[in-house]
Amino acid sequence: MTTIAATKSQIAADRQATHNGGLKFKMKTKLNSFDNKFFYKTPFHVGLAGNIDSFPDVLTFFLKPDQYKKAPKLKGGEGLILSDDGKIWTFSSPDTWFLVDQPYYSIGSGMNFAMGVLSTGASAYEAVKQASKLDPSTGMGITKIDV
């Protein structure tokens, strides 16, 4: 799947994707930034984990929510949001966010490895880097956004 991690000041994600047949390939990024005040008062950054077939609909929903009668669901996945005011959110439907009331969080197949690293005070980037050493579905580089 992937590993996406966030602290109050940084969100990071690996770039590996795995096709159903097991073929691994490198994505440009799994992080996207939005400045849509319809959803939140400050810009926010979204990382998606799960079935990438649902990613385009979810990302388009953040850009043009009025084009949808019903919010798309992440198929077998989860989203992680870091807002520019340092709040961390998680969701499985982009119209319903859940505030994570702790200083860090991670999603994806390498989340447990990343959470262990984050618990030491490490950055989100470092957490994904370390998770990529242990989780076979995490790797091929890391993208990060600092807020």
Image (spheres, helix red, strand yellow):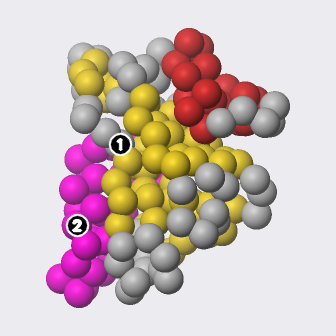
Q: Which residues are magenta?
A: 50-79
Given residues 143 and 99, the one toward you in this image is: 143
Given residues 13 and 79, the one toward you in this image is: 13
Query: Residue 37, image x and y in percent?
Result: 40, 84
Q: Quadrant of the C terminus?
A: bottom right
Residue 120 seen:
yes
Query: Residue 19, image x and y in percent?
Result: 25, 26
Judged left or right of residue 23, residue 101 is right
Crowd around label 1: few <14 · some 14–19 · many ≥20 (10 Å): many
Judged left or right of residue 39, residue 125 is right
Judged left or right of residue 55, residue 46 is right
> Which residue was labeled with disc 1?
30
Q: Secondary structure at mark 1?
A: loop
Residue at the image point whose x is 75% and y is 53% from the top: 103
Residue at the image point whose x is 54% and y is 65% from the top: 83
> Which residue was labeled with disc 2?
60
